[in-house]
Image (cartoon, rainbow, N blue to C red):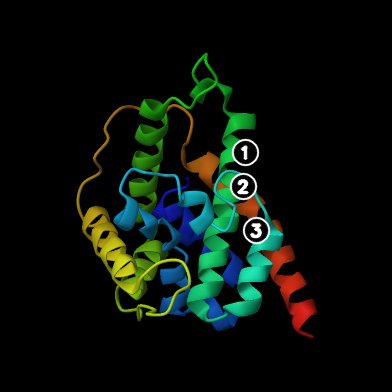
Amino acid sequence: MALTMVHLAAANLWAQKHPEYLESPEFYYGAISPDAVHVRDGSDKSHKNEVHLNNWVSPHPDDVIRYWLEHDTPFDIGYGVHVLTDGQWVPRYKERLPGIMRPNGLLNTDIYYNDSFITDFMLHDTRPRLRQILDMVERAQTPEDHPLLEGYMFSRWRAGLLEAYRGQCPKHDPVQFIDEAYVDAFIADCIPLIEDTYQKLMKLRA
């Protein structure tokens, strides 16, 4: 999965053309919140694809549209943006970063998490807009009637992220694959699917 700053940067880039969300704390709160499943399930990932609307490891935009047709608050729009971002993240690194995979075809998690954390913390530390968005997330209202997760899970997940990113990066080895350039290219390339999915929603609502 993409880490927090990737999700916030992607949400912010998409919202450039949707000003109703650009300064919405709840939109960005939604854009970090599907991973609150870890508050409930810990390291058990058996429910993660369900909570990610079937978009955890590959994109399924029709499932996001169905979700948005029933749940369309700014939080929910951000939630959908998150899962559509994740759905594109995994296939891309599998295709473009063969060196990050082990000979048995599984992800080398040592390299992956080292790269991801270092680059994510660098983005937080060097891009004022991302720090501003994180401040917005801190003051966002927590939904209490979400169909997949409970409000306290979102609140605890947010609190943990705020504490983590205002501290020190937990990884320290040199970055090998997932660097700033890789992330920026990914963010730019993931926006068209998000936009296409949203526009399909708008047509259904017209």
What residue sits 39% from the left and 27% below the top?
111
Mark 3–mark 1 contact, CB under 8 Å? no
Q: Amino acid at mark 1?
A: Pro
Residue 7: horizontal and vertical position, in percent?
48, 57
Q: Is residue 96 above or below residue 139?
A: above
Dot 3: what SS? helix
Residue for badge 2:
88
- Depth-wise, is mark 3 or mark 2 nearer the camera? 2
Residue for badge 3:
191
Q: In this orientation, does residue 185 appear?
A: no
Q: Amino acid at mark 3?
A: Ile
Residue for badge 1:
91
Residue 175: horizontal and vertical position, in percent?
39, 30
**Mark 1 vs mark 2, CA separation in Å:** 6 Å
Query: Foreground residue, 41 or 4?
Result: 41
Mark 1–mark 2 contact, CB under 8 Å? yes
Binning the other alpha carbons within 10 Å of mark 2 as few (below 14), some (14 to 19) or many (20 upward) gives many
Q: Amino acid at mark 2?
A: Gln
Query: Foreground residue, 58 or 115?
Result: 58
- N-terminal-most mark, 3 or 2: 2
- Report whether 95 appears left or right of 74: right
When asked about the image quadrant of residue 151, the answer is bottom left
What residue sits 21% from the left and 47% below the top?
168
**Mark 3 vs mark 2, CA separation in Å:** 10 Å
**Mark 3 vs mark 1, CA separation in Å:** 15 Å
What residue sits 52% from the left and 13% below the top?
103
Marking on residue 78: none
Query: Foreground residue, 1 or 133?
Result: 1
